[in-house]
Image (tube, rainbow, N blue to C red):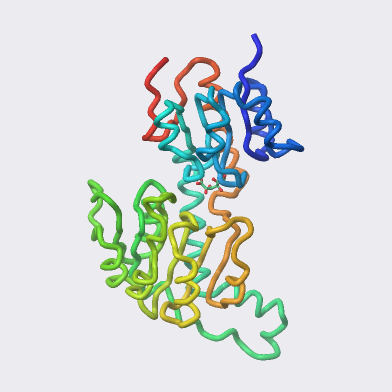
Amino acid sequence: MSKPILLSTGIQMPLVGQGLEASYNVQWLNNAADRNRLLAEIGPKVTAVCTGAHTGVKTDAALLAQLPALKIIGNVGVGYDSIDVPTAVKRGIIVTNTPDVLNEEVADTAIALLLNTIREFPQSEVYLRAGRWAKEGDYPLTAGSLRDRKIGMIGFGRIGRAIGRRIEAFGIPISYFGRTKQTGISYPFYTDLVAMARDVDTLIAILPGGPATQHIVNAEVLKALGPRGVFINMARGSIVDEAALKAALRAKTIHAAGLDVFASEPNFDPDLLTIPSLVLLPHVGSASQLTRNAMGQLVVDNLAAFAAGKAPLTPVPETPFKGW
Ligand code: 8YV
């Protein structure tokens, strides 16, 4: 029997490519000289897709319409906002993601970005490398310190709680904003983001992207955060109004921001580079070999299980596996 056809929307780690090829006839959209031609040829026979935010390709309504036999989409990453989930639900397509295996890595990165933003470590290294220390004296004392801060978590899911545990160890008070109050969590809970922003001075965003959270951090939230305010985004670029953020940083109505994610990736707005109070990372939250291998293996395991007639391991809540 010939292997089922899987479409990869972009380049994947060797571990993923090789793992998928054991169960599937893998077709690479990124290698196609003419993508439309490839889709016209193989689209009707594709039963599985492997994708991820890093591929830069959206598994949107237009792509899904070209894949009428599709049964499963394996996403490299916990966030699956590049996939049109409502259409997947309607068509009975299972979507899987990579929860849990990246929690601690992303939480570590969030803390690094938080400290780098508040204490200006990247800027002070640039100062050292430019030979300014001996010539001009010590790097200026930073206006910001983690010591006197109150942190508000925007989203308090699995990664949010891993960040929360670290912040608690630092002895810093935490609040959180979300849709529902979490059982067993005693931190102050807000359903009103502006109210939380008013009560804290540091926001860390770690919530899903997509239409429901589009520009949830807007001019009003940033204004409420105030002039000592620090905003850290570990979620998706879509959750913040980047124009409002740039304006707030330029007008110093907030103090600083650290971004691991952007409205457009990898071609982010170059104007961001002109703002000295911004610390910028190229979406590296989970980007160690150790963690990406674990994520890649989970994608392979999900898609291989499905090809072998077994239940996928980690379907997203919207598309539970209901049996054969
Ligand atoms: C990955 C991420 O960079 O898990 C996620 O949602 O954003 C990152 O860990 C990305 O998904 C790789 O495609």
In-image side of 77 versus 1 (left or right): left
Q: Is 314 rendered above or below residue 146?
A: above
Q: Is 251 rendered above or below residue 14?
A: below
Image spot of residue 220 (x, y percent): 34, 71
Q: Residue furthest right?
A: 33
The residue lying at 23 percent from left, 60 percent from top is 188
Q: Is 88 rendered above or below residue 192?
A: above
Q: Residue furthest top?
A: 1
Q: Quadrant of the C terminus?
A: top left
In this view of the protein, can residue 291 be seen by the observer?
Answer: no
In-image side of 61 versus 160 (left or right): right
Q: Quadrant of the N terminus?
A: top right
Image spot of residue 65 (x, y percent): 53, 32
Image spot of residue 142 (x, y percent): 50, 81
The residue lying at 55 percent from left, 69 percent from top is 279
Q: Quadrant of residue 252?
A: bottom left
In-image side of 2 versus 193 (left or right): right
The residue lying at 55 percent from left, 43 percent from top is 58
Q: Nearer the viewer, residue 55 or 174?
A: 55
Q: How many marks?
A: 0
The residue lying at 40 percent from left, 31 percent from top is 89
Q: Nearer the viewer, residue 308 or 126?
A: 308
In-image side of 73 versus 321 (left or right): right
Image spot of residue 285 (x, y percent): 53, 53
In this view of the protein, can residue 213 be seen by the observer?
Answer: yes
